[in-house]
Amino acid sequence: MHIKPKKRLGQNFLKDKNIQRKIIRGCGVSGEDIVLEIGAGTGDLTAELALVSKDVYALEIDRHLIPLLEKNVAHLANCRAIEADILKFDINKFIRENKINRKIKVVANIPYYISSPIIEHLIGYRDKISAIFLTVQKEFGRRVVAAPGSKDYGSFSCFVLYYLKPKILFEIKKNSFYPAPKVDSCFLSLEVREEPPVSVKNETMFFKLIRSAFNQRRKTLRNSLEGVVAQERLEEFFNAHGIDKNARPEELSLEQFAGLNNFKN
Ligand code: SAH
């Protein structure tokens, strides 16, 4: 490779062809799909995606990589490189300008350092996206898909679950990348929900409640929600739902957090 990978941009290029194929298969992209690829790098995955989808728009922040990316996809008429930072990229404007009239799929083999900001940014455009496929650090993936009761379950699991259906598709060993990162990864599928799985009266309050609950996860909810939910209301809710009065945040499901948020509110 003639380029010097930049650590600060999370440049770990996928060199394992097998994993590349698994990613393409995992995304389930078909001939009608419009794909927005984030962090296209030198365009290896981009070219493969272009072969199976209708159009691929390949976002890359590093302008030094753009010429190489363009060269690698030059033979593909349905593929375009865009120099942009995903976190500043306005997907509504992009969809308008390119006259895209269906929900897009987002594919990002861009490990680690901006996984959660990317997910949060994309959730902001959820009405335009059908699914997101993302390489993440293995531990991060576990947190995303964690179920109540597990040590990985936290406010981010709840946030994701409210908007998306997360699933770990497979693991990717660190030596599949060049240069190899310090940790193993996994490939996540995040299907965008049409509707949240629970109905919530006030989303801002709901997420504030969840964040406060998990703020000090070793504390009981009674303690961590002091000042957020009136103690009598909390006690009444626990009684009504058979929840132990000393329950800790990881014991509550998304449904129960929603129930608490809506309870007598
Ligand atoms: N997808 C390629 C490259 C992976 S490395 C492959 O599979 O080999 C991750 C890439 O994301 C790098 O090229 C890096 O420059 C790019 N990147 C990092 N931050 C970005 C951002 N905020 N927006 C768009 N691209 C970004």
Image: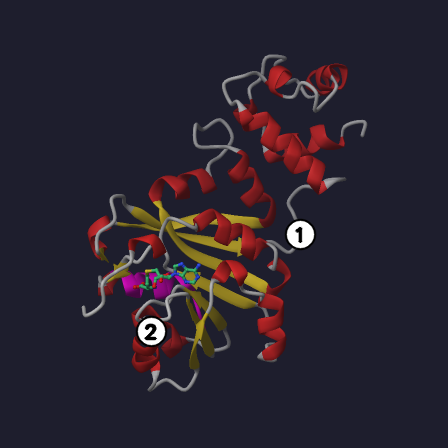
Is residue 26 rendered magenta in the image? yes
Q: Is mark 2 within 8 Å of ligand 1?
A: no
Q: Position of residue 173 (x, y in %)?
A: 24, 49
108 lies left or right of 250: left
Sequence-wise first label, 2 or 1: 2
Q: Residue 226 appears at what percent x and percent y?
A: 67, 18
Assign a secondary structure to mark 1.
loop
Q: Which mark is residue 48?
A: 2
Task: Report crowding for label 1: few under 14, some 14 to 19, many 20 or more residues within 10 A (C-alpha).
Answer: few
Q: Write the residue at 27% across / 61% down.
A: 13
Q: Say which quadrant the N terminus sits in.
A: bottom left
Q: Main secondary structure of the magenta part?
A: helix
Q: Is residue 128 magenta?
A: no
Magenta segment = 19-30
Q: Residue at 44% x, 58% y: name it.
A: 133
Question: SS for tag 2?
Answer: helix
* Mark sitting on residue 195: 1
The C terminus sits in image quarter: top right
Residue 104 position, x and y percent, is: 54, 68
